Image (spheres, rainbow, N blue to C red):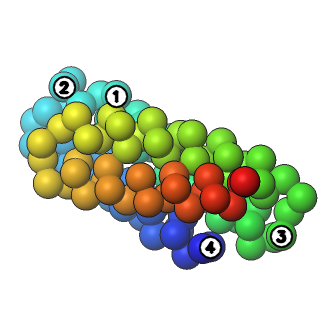
Amino acid sequence: LLALPWGHLVQCTALTGCPLLLGKINKMAECIRMDIQCAQICRLAASYMAQNSEYANDICQLCADICQKCADECAKHDADHCQACAQACQQCANACASIAA
């Protein structure tokens, strides 16, 4: 399970530049913001899990909430990279929610 947040944060981080390349920065501002926040919380969650921290479950719940919001936002956009990100975010949200439970 530890690999899931790491792989997901790479996906979110890589995709933050796609709207710039497509010239759609204004239309996708919220998507970009959520991708960045999602990547940051995934990095933190993976780090806390790797440390077997007593706070890992709390961080994982927050990660699940943010990843779900990011999945919902990315799913609003038709671009392939947005749909791929939405799917990765949903998988990570589900995994983190199960860890936090």
Q: Amino acid at mark 3?
A: Asn
Q: Name the mark on residue 52.
A: 3
Label 3 environment density (alpha carbons within 10 Å; few <14, some 14–19, many ≥20): few
Label 4 environment density (alpha carbons within 10 Å; few <14, some 14–19, many ≥20): some
Task: Name which of mark 1 and mark 3 comes first in the sequence.
Answer: 1
Q: Amino acid at mark 1?
A: Glu
Label 2 environment density (alpha carbons within 10 Å; few <14, some 14–19, many ≥20): few
Closer to viewer: mark 4 or mark 2: 4
Q: Are marks 2 and 3 in contact (CB under 8 Å)?
A: no
User: Residue 88, can we see it?
Assistant: yes
Dot 1: what SS?
helix
Q: Which residue is mark 1?
A: 30
Q: Measured from the top left, where is residue 24 in percent x and y?
A: 14, 33
Relative to 44, does residue 61 appear above or below in the rendering?
Answer: above
Name the residue rendered at 74%, 67% in the picture.
49
Name the residue rendered at 68%, 61% in the picture.
99
Q: Which residue is mark 4?
A: 2
Dot 2: what SS?
loop
Q: Residue furthest right?
A: 54
Dot 4: what SS?
loop
Report the side of 88 relative to 83 (left or right): right
Q: Are marks 1 and 3 in contact (CB under 8 Å)?
A: no
Which quadrant is the N terminus positioned in?
Answer: bottom right
Q: Measured from the top left, where is residue 47 in percent x and y?
A: 71, 64
Q: Which residue is mark 2?
A: 27
Closer to viewer: mark 2 or mark 3: 3
Q: Amino acid at mark 2?
A: Lys
Report the side of 14 relative to 18 (left or right): right
